[in-house]
Each structure stands twice: as C-alpha cells, then as structure tokens.
Image: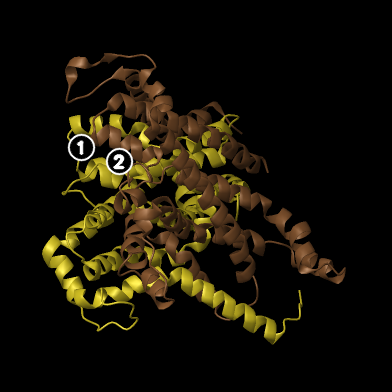
Chain colours: A brown, B yellow
Amino acid sequence: MATQQTRSLARFMMAPSVILLFVWMIVPLLFTLWFSFQQYNPLNPIRNGFVGFSNYALFYSNPAFLSSILNTLIIVVSVLVITVVGGILLALLLDQPIWGQGIVRILVISPFFVMPPVAALVWKNMIMHPQYGVFADIARFFGAEPIDWFGQHPLTAIILIVAWQWLPFATLILLTSLQSLDGEQKEAAEMDGAGFISRFIYLTLPHMSRAITVVILIQTIFLLSVYAEILVTTNGGPGYASTNLPFLVYQKALLEFKIGQASAGGVIAVILANIVAFFAMRAVGKNLDK
Amino acid sequence: MARAVTTQHKTIATAAAWIVALLIFFPILYTIITSFKSEQEAIQGFALIPSGTMESYAEVQAQSGYFKFFLNSVILSVGSTLLAILIAVPAAWSMAFSPTKRTKDILMWMLSTKMMPAVAVLFPIYLIFRDTGLLDSRVGLTVMLMLINLPIVVWMLYTYFREIPGEILEAARMDGASLWNEIIYVLTPMAVPGIASTMLLNIILAWNEAFWTIRLTTTNAAPLTAFISSFSSPQGLFWAKLSAASTLAIAPILIMGWFSQKQLVRGLTFGAVK
C-alpha cells in the first residue's frame, strides 16, 4: 500500500515537526557544550578563552555545585516517595464506593492545575508563614512554637509544596489504572478468602506496577527541573540550602554571567536527565509494540 | 460485579475521602476566601468567612494593569497551541496512517527532546532571543511554548489518530473518494474529538509553564506566571491582592482542567495509561 508517492507525502508531512525539534534541540545544546569549555563572561571579556575541563572541575571543588546536585536528588526522591505512596493510598480510597465521588475527584485533582508561582506563593504566605500562616495558627492553638519553614527547613518546605502539586497527578493516574482492574478477578480473590492486604499485594499492586512506573518516570522528568517554586520562595537560600541544579545554572548564567560554569552545569543536567530518559523511553516504548 | 456494599462501609469511606479531599483542596479554597477579604482582615488570623469585599480585585487591576497579563496568557497559550496543532497534525497523521519502519524511532526521539532540561539551553536561547529582538516579545514566546509542547502534541494526536480504523479509509477509497474528500468528509469528523482534547491539555500546559515565560519576558509579553512571581519580593503584606490575582490566574485553567481529567491521564502518560 505504501507507494513511492504516499511515502514521500508522509515525509513531507512529517518534515516541519522533525526539523523544528531537531534545530531546537541540537543548536542550543551545541552552544552550551561549547561554552562549557570556555571562560566566557560578557562583563569581563578580556579573560575569555578556552579553559578545558576546569568548569567541570568546579563540581568537585566548589561546595555549591555538589550541594546543588544533592539538593536536586533530595527533591526528586522525597517528592516521588510522598506522591507515589500517597497516591496509591488515595487511589485505593477513591476507588471505594463513596457519595459525591465526582466532586471529591475534582477537589483532589485541582492542585495540579495551579501554576507553580501561585502554588508556591500561596504556601509561602498563607500556609507556612511563621507569623500569619495557617500552620502557625495551628501550632499556636496547640501551644507550640510556630516553625520558620523557609528559614529553618527551606528544602523541606519546597518538597512539601512540590509534593502538593504532584500528588494529584499520581493519584489520578493510579486511580485510572486501578479502575481498569477486572472486577471479576477481585471478586474471585475475595471468594477464595484473600484478605485486603493479600489482595493488594498479589493482585492490585502487580496490576498497577506499570502505572507506577509511568508516574515515577514522568514526575522525575519534571522534578529534575523544579525552578519557579524555588525562585518565589527561598531564592535558593539561605546560602545554597535550597539551590538545586537548574536554579544554580540560572544564577550563574543570568545573575553572575559566569557562562562557562553555567554551561557545565547545564551539561551535567542533561546527563542526569538522560539517565532517567533512558529508562523512561524503554517503558513507554514497550507500550508502542502492543 | 454485584459486590455487596454495606452502608457502613460506604459511610466511612465517604467521610475519609471527603476529609482528605478538602485538606488537599484547602490552599486553593483559602486563597479564594482571602481574595474577598481586605488587606487588614487577611493577616488577622485564621478566618473562613470573609467580609466579601471586592476591593482587592479592583486594586489589582488599578495598580498593576492585571488584565494585560491575563491577555498575554491567553494569547500565548492559545497561540502556541494553535501553532503546535498546525504543525503536528500532518506529522501525527502520516505516522498513524502510513507508518514506516522508522516511525517508532522518530516518535521516541521526539519524546526525548521533551526530556532535555530547560536550563541546559537557557543561555544560548537567551542570547538568540536577545540578538534577534525576540526577548519580551509575544511572537518569540509563542514559538518557544510551541516548541516545548510540540512532542506532547504530536504524541497525543498520534495515539488518537491510531484509533481511527484504517478500513474506513479503504472503504471510502473503494467508493472513489479522492484524497481530499477522504480527509474532509471521512477523517476530519473522526479526528476532531482527539484534536480538541489535545488542544485543551496543551493550553493548560502552556498557561502554567513557569520557566521560559518568567525568564524571557519583562513587561510587554509577560503572562500571569511572570506577574504572580513579581509578588515574591514583599514590600509589605499584600495577601488579599495576591489572593485575588491568584484566583483570577488559576480559575480558567482549573475549570478547563476539571473537564479534561481523562485526556490529562492519556496525554501526560503518552498513551501508556488510559
């Protein structure tokens, strides 16, 4: 059926997307790679030039770089644990017969649609503010000292905000997967006397494993590049306490104009993302064959 | 399927689900409530009943020209979505209806571009935008948002198009329909729901994009993400105004989102979970 003519038509139809994405991905990336071996500072052009791997060496010698990678990983792993465990529990709960299920679903999914700056500022000012926030009100109600979230535990605060944004996503996807579980299988297991726990371990969890994988992979892609939440709450501080890799790259590039260092950070970010992408592609690719 | 559900079980589950749901929704609810308070009220401690004043809404518009940012958000999200659809439909179409050996590789490669971290190209893009005068321009940002969402659009359209049975095309061809007629009368009506869902999800994603929209704009092309971020440097406590601006910024997308739950799952998992 694929004649020469339809084949060239297909190529012609695909060309714009492919070319655009290719240019958009390759050209800036080559720039970044080139800059990462340069000392380049638009404010101090005299010392510009090739410097080999010294920008990368900073990742070993400068504590800010190392801690930014560590913070990136802490954010990713903590949010994943909270959202996946929380998401499974919530999905199990919402899968029960309940009154007003439609409204409950809408309430639970809502945070996902809140733009990151709004989510972060609302949490920062109205929920976690050490003086006027709701958490402070609750603490005072119980006679406790309110916690200065962004001063004392900046990374924890950011993790809480980001987890709040992504919990709905995990819940929605896990719930969708749960609802496709065959009712008869569940019934049969029940008839055989399988309790809730063993039903969950031997039937539900294996059924959801694919959805869980997808949730982990997709969230990781987005969590590796958390940015706005940090920008509007702690601005990376105090010190570098809540600076992750994307935020450090932004600081180096657009605030300090240390383009070489920023680019090296960018290349490291690409490598990190590629490790994840490798697994993600395999998981999604398997589905294509079906 | 006739599982006996006791009323007791249902009552407990309902209570638990509602409590959890309200807790999760609380920050949004409290923002909406606070937006109807005066600035004084807003910092007077926890209160769920506002005085109902609309002054914050009026002030947000009067002081900062809120509507301009709102309009930019609409232009950027809708514009980039239309552009992406225009470019992606032919690609998804040809991959779904005349796939070759390489189709799968191309799809995977497109997906991989979505995984490239934005910071990796921040400076080159910034330079290109600056030198071509695209910084803080709606055109530049529209193209940018189109590019970052193009892989998702192609993928989503592809998964929808693939579900259109090929036999229908053959039947139309047997009846002597030309390629053009085939597209207009047979394929388009079947493709419209898929295209509509794709657009809906993409508008949501573009509306909430908060890296490039903040970094590549200053005033002219700044959408709501950039406007709200400007509240982060507090010269005083403007919580009622922040709440009013936030409520207006999230309301349209929240409502669109409620209607697109199913498409969301499908679009964001690249068809892996339906």
In the image, A178: left or right of A272?
right
Q: CA distance from mark 1 to mark 2?
A: 10 Å
Residue B272 spot, x, y in % from top left: 60, 49
Q: Nearer the viewer, residue A137 or B56?
A: A137
Q: Residue at x 57, y 35 (%)?
A: B99
Q: Residue at x 60, y 29 (%)?
A: B101
Vertical comparison of A186 with B95: above or below: below
Residue ID for mark 2? B143
Kindly identify the amino acid type of the residue bearing the numbered disc 2.
Val
Q: Nearer the viewer, residue B6 or A156?
A: A156
Q: Nearer the viewer, residue B91 or B242?
A: B242
Q: Nearer the viewer, residue B143 or A91?
A: A91
Q: Tell me where residue A284 sits by quadrant.
A: top right
Q: Secondary structure at mark 2?
A: helix
Residue B180 spot, x, y in % from top left: 45, 44
Q: Residues within 10 Å of mark 1 (few under 14, many from 20)?
A: some
Residue ID for mark 1? B134
Is residue A171 something one can see in this rendering? yes
Q: Residue at x 63, y 84 (%)?
A: B11
Is residue B179 something one can see in this rendering? no
Kindly identify the amino acid type of the residue bearing the numbered disc 1.
Leu
Label for residue B157? none
Residue B70 spot, x, y in % from top left: 23, 59
Q: Tell me where residue B147 sits by quadrant.
A: top left
Q: Secondary structure at mark 1?
A: loop
In the image, A172: left or right of B42?
right
Q: Residue furthest bottom?
A: B7
Q: In front of the other: label 1 or label 2? A: 1
Label 2 marks which chain's residue?
A: B
Q: Quadrant of the C terminus of chain B?
A: bottom right
Mark 1 and 2 residues: CB-CB less than 8 Å, in contact? yes
